[in-house]
Image: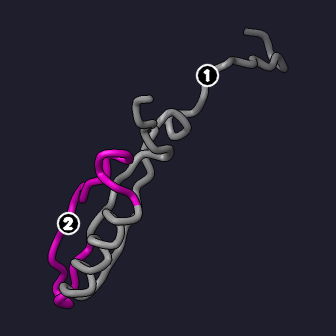
């Protein structure tokens, strides 16, 4: 490749290919449980493949957790 040449490709950045959205939350234990339940109600597992991807206890007695779901719901069969 010579100097000053620009190469254009049709590659999409990796982050654009990921069909999932991940959201990190930090809450007190009971609030974390409530938030996760509400998240599953808003984004049902059968349509969004929703899951708690990871979680950990913090020294502050809080829970840090990552929710993962599809960007778009799975369409129900006709």
Which residue does the image show at 27% across and 86% down from the upper left? 31
At which x and y percent is residue 29?
Answer: 18, 85
Q: Judging from the image, what secondary structure is the residue with disc 2 in?
A: strand
Q: Say which residue label 2 marks.
A: 55
Magenta stretch containing residue 62, yes or no?
A: yes
In the figure, residue 53 lies in which quadrant? Answer: bottom left
Numbered circle sitting on residue 72:
none
Q: Say which residue label 1 marks.
A: 11
- Judge left or right: residue 28 versus residue 78: left
Front-most of residues 39 and 19: 39
Disc 1 packing (10 Å; few <14; some 14–19; many ≥20): few
- Judge left or right: residue 26 versus residue 55: right
Magenta stretch containing residue 10, yes or no?
A: no
Q: Colour scheme used in the picture?
A: one colour
Q: Residue reaching furthest top? A: 1
Asked if residue 47 is positioned above or below residue 2 in the image, the reply reads below
Q: Judging from the image, what secondary structure is the residue with disc 1 in?
A: loop
Which residue does the image show at 29% across and 83% down from the upper left? 27
Asked if residue 34 is positioned above or below residue 36 in the image, the reply reads below
At which x and y percent is residue 1?
Answer: 73, 9
Report the span colored magenta. Answer: 43-64
Q: Residue reaching furthest front? A: 78
Q: Which quadrant does the C terminus fall into?
A: top left
């Amino acid at each position: 490749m010579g100097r000053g040449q620009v190469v254009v490709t049709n590659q999409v950045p990796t982050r654009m290919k990921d069909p999932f959205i991940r959201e990190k939350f930090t809450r007190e234990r009971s609030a974390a449980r409530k938030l996760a339940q509400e998240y599953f109600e808003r984004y049902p597992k059968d349509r969004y493949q929703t899951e708690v991807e990871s979680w950990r206890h913090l020294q502050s007695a809080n829970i840090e957790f990552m929710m993962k779901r599809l960007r778009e719901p799975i369409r129900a069969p006709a």
